[in-house]
Amino acid sequence: MQYQNSLAFAKQLDQEDSLAFLRDEFHIPRDAPENSGGKEWIYFTGNSLGLQPKMTQKYLQQELDDWANLGVEGHFEAKNPWLNYHEDLSIKMAKIVGAKPIEVTIANTLTVNLHLLMVSFYQPTKNKYKILIESDAFPSDRYAVESQLKFHGFDPKESLVEWKSRKGETLLNLEDLEQIIQNQGDEIALLLIGGLNYYTGQFLDLKKIAAIGHSKNCKVGIDLAHGAGNIQPNLHDSNIDFAAWCTYKYLNSGPGSLGGIFVHEKYAKNNDLPRFAGWWNHNKKTRFNMRMPFDVMEGAEGWQLSNPPILSMAAIKASLDIFDKIGMDALRAKSEKLTGFFEFLIHQLDSDKIKIITPKNPSERGCQLSIQVKNADKSLHKKLSANNIITDWREPDVIRCAPVPMYNSFEDVFQMVSVLKNLINEQ
Ligand SMILES: *Cc1c(COP(=O)(O)O)cnc(C)c1O
């Protein structure tokens, strides 16, 4: 695509954008009226907390009303009966991550799910016990993995293997992973990797990672927190063993909302996998007989433990209904164009004060661009915020910017870079 550096061109792209109407379906935060007349923020942090769909309130109200009017009968009599509330959501979620319905459910929260999945897929033996993560893993993932190692009696110093980027580089290289697995694969039980790195925005080739891990009989799990609703991970075809993600980032389901679970179909009927149990992963046909011995459910539902919070589920439903209407293909097509335009405009600044560290190849990234700032000068991020441009600063020296195709416009991108240009020239 041939981009032009002008506001008129940005406006033309918005006019031609068949998804432009979606912006109006979201609450866009605004400045206080007394400051700038209540101007809308340029919100580039949908990778951290997605914006609220206007319909969410209605979906929540439905459940509040059913609870008010039906009490416990709502489990069966609500407009959307609570007992099976998640089933329709799992089908929609499966489409978003490229999985079969039996492979996906929505339950618990992300870090909790990583632990529950490790109960099943991290089965260390005396000789095969190490866990591999990427060296710049999200802290929660690192803590989770370290605590699993300790729980099984291993010392993370010796048993946590890190896949690092090469000296002088920021991105991960699959050849290095291959090398580690060749050398230490016999001792590694599990690879747990962020499929789309929260810091650099790099989207890894999941199919290759699965093949590399499986070549030495390691289990392969993926944290998709920054991937779900952003890129198309094709989880089933990738052949990874399991994945977990949250729904409050690109999936716009509200702060702290529930997480998604993927377990590959090849385990759907494997009742022998070790796992933790509760009544919600017990066979739903006999769940209410109450006195049956535990009989695990097939598929990803076999990792649910508790009956889910319907109010959180309602917010997920509001969001997934939008995703379902639009489809990931259309969203992704816009996303590539939007981020491509953003990248083009930043390159036009031709400044040595900032550098994009996210991969150039659209198939190796989602919508986020991570801008590395020279001398780790944090003031640039502060000044962007003072101009109502919401990005986030990640230590040591990166401003993360995520133009989200669901509600950000080409004009947002143009305005953001115009302000950035002034701020850089001022310095
Ligand atoms: C956002 C994020 C988390 C957050 O985990 P919660 O359990 O939802 O608090 C964990 N890991 C990664 C990679 C994330 O991006």
Image (cartoon, rainbow, N blue to C red):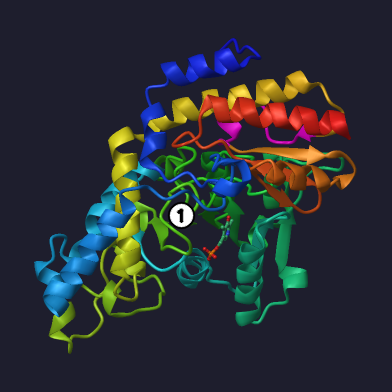
Q: Dot 1 surroundings within 10 Å: few (below 14), some, or many (20 or more)? A: many
Reply above or below: 370 against 51: above
Reply above or below: 403 against 79: above
Q: Main secondary structure of the magenta part?
A: loop
Q: Is mark 1 within 8 Å of ligand 1?
A: no
Q: Quadrant of ligand 1?
A: bottom right
- Residue occupying the point 68% across, 77% down: 154
- Residue occupying the point 52% across, 18% down: 11
Depth order, front residue of 7/158? 7
Residue 361 visible in the current orientation: no
Q: Does residue 15 appear left or right of residue 79 in this picture? A: right
Q: Does residue 150 appear left or right of residue 63 in this picture? A: right
* Chain part drawn in magenta: 355-367
Residue 53 appears at what percent x and percent y? 37, 47
- Residue occupying the point 67% across, 51% down: 181
Reply above or below: 235 against 336: below
Depth order, front residue of 206/182? 206
Residue 66 appears at what percent x and percent y? 16, 68
Residue 410 appears at what percent x and percent y? 54, 25
- Look at the image and tell me in which quarter the C terminus lies: top right
User: Badge 1 is on which residue?
Assistant: 241
Within the magenta stretch, is there residue 357? yes
Which quadrant holds residue 171? Answer: top right
